[in-house]
Amino acid sequence: MSSRAAGRSIPLPIQSMSARTQHRTGEPDRDSESVARALREVPHRRRNALTGDWLLVSPHRTQRPWHGHTEPRQAAARPSYDPDCYLCPGNRRAGGAENPTYTSTFVFSNDFPALTDITVSRLNGSSPLRAAAPVQGACRVVCFSPRHDLRMSGMSIPDIRAVVDVWGEEVERLGVRYRWIQIFENNGAMMGCSNPHPHGQIWATSEIPHEPGKEDVCQREYHATNGRPLLADYLTNELVAQERVVAENDDWVAVVPFWAVWPFETLLIPRAHRVRLPDLGETERDNLADILRTLLRAYDGLFDTDFPYSMGWHGAPEPGGHQEHWMLHAHFYPPLLRSASVKKFLVGYEMLAEPQRDLTPEAAAERLRSLVHAAHPSHP
Ligand code: H2U
Ligand code: ZN
């Protein structure tokens, strides 16, 4: 079927519409309005500028009936200390080590690390069809708080700031030895997190993994062409448009990215050009703690639940290397779609072709933003 035969009255391909917007100076408003309308109403594809990946957006499908699986609501009440928790202060871990009676944060080397410093001299055979590569690395576990019953969204701003400082220290320390340091938090049983005690992980590797590798290429190419960091320009555009902005303060902005795959995915970007966590100043760290709390509380408020998510930081690889193209940022990937128990699965077409979403990133941002505004009426 030709695209002409398939087309109905509204849709123009998104790319050709934006080209028209750039070239016709006479009616910019009407053109950008029709682009916005098509993005709201017509199936289209969007490109992730950070990775080059594409996704399918099907905004007209948000009203379809749903009869799938419902996750049971998780019981919220937990003790502040659990004698059986391997992360609580003073307890023994599975590997036999005993945790100190820590009162703020506590970092230790993972007793079951996914990476080691074992080196192999030969791994890659002669066949490109059986490629393998060596990797060395280290894994750390970061307890955010001695309190077993807290989540980051329930911690005080100074206590979250302590976590920010630990993240920065670990990047500094591990960066001496490894090219990539992946800080992440897997939160909630729905995300496969094994223990509710507030904690995150850090995996450092001798090689740059696949996702940040794509981001490095895209940011490098953009910088080579435009002379500015990709995310700096992206942020400027988002602040003008406002429709995907969820929360902002003097140093940070949280947006649902234009290319979001997960229903309520967000991207947290510093206003200033910062490349790695250790580069953040005092006020930027305080404001980071503040916006983390605001964002996580908006998530919890969305479906009145302990909102599960995976989050993590992408700072420039290879500390000390050429990195002006890179901009520090954090990704939040929450799985929930339409209630505390209905999550999105990346299956079917998404496994075989490309990710797809029904709810538009703009609609998701509006819902999160309204929760931020309700909690902070003075918020910009
Ligand atoms: P989750 O973030 O997926 O819950 O994992 C917690 C990590 O803690 C996991 O990587 C480690 C596991 O290997 N761990 C220890 O290092 N020591 C223990 O005693 C139990 C769990
Ligand atoms: Zn605990």
Image (spheres, helix red, strand yellow):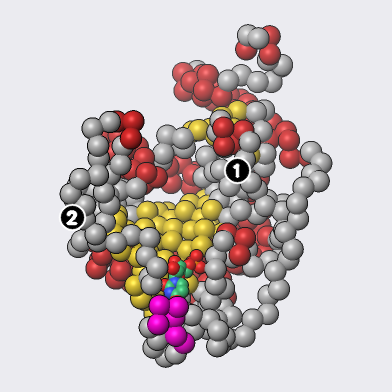
The residue drawn where x is 51% and y is 45% is: 257
Q: Looking at the picture, how far across and down is residue 278, in whole percent?
A: 28, 65
Q: Looking at the picture, how far across and down is residue 122, in whole percent?
A: 20, 45
The residue drawn where x is 77% and y is 47% is: 68
Left or right, residue 146 beside residue 167? right
What is the number of the mark on residue 346?
Answer: 1
Left or right, residue 260 beside residue 287? right
Local packing at callout 2 (Cα closer than 10 Å; few below 14, some 14-19, many 20+) is: few
Local packing at callout 1 (Cα closer than 10 Å; few below 14, some 14-19, many 20+) is: some
In the image, what residue type sits under mark 2? Gly
Residue 226 vs 316, above or below: the answer is above
Q: Which residues are magenta?
A: 91-96
| Mark nearer the viewer, 2 or 1 | 1
**Of label 2 and label 1, which has the lower sequence position?**
2
What is the number of the mark on residue 320?
Answer: 2
> Which part of the image, by quadrant, shows the N terminus?
top right
What is the number of the mark on residue 128?
Answer: none
Say which element carries label 1: loop
> Which part of the image, by quadrant, shows the C terminus?
bottom right
Residue 333 visible within the image: yes
The residue drawn where x is 66% and y is 33% is: 58
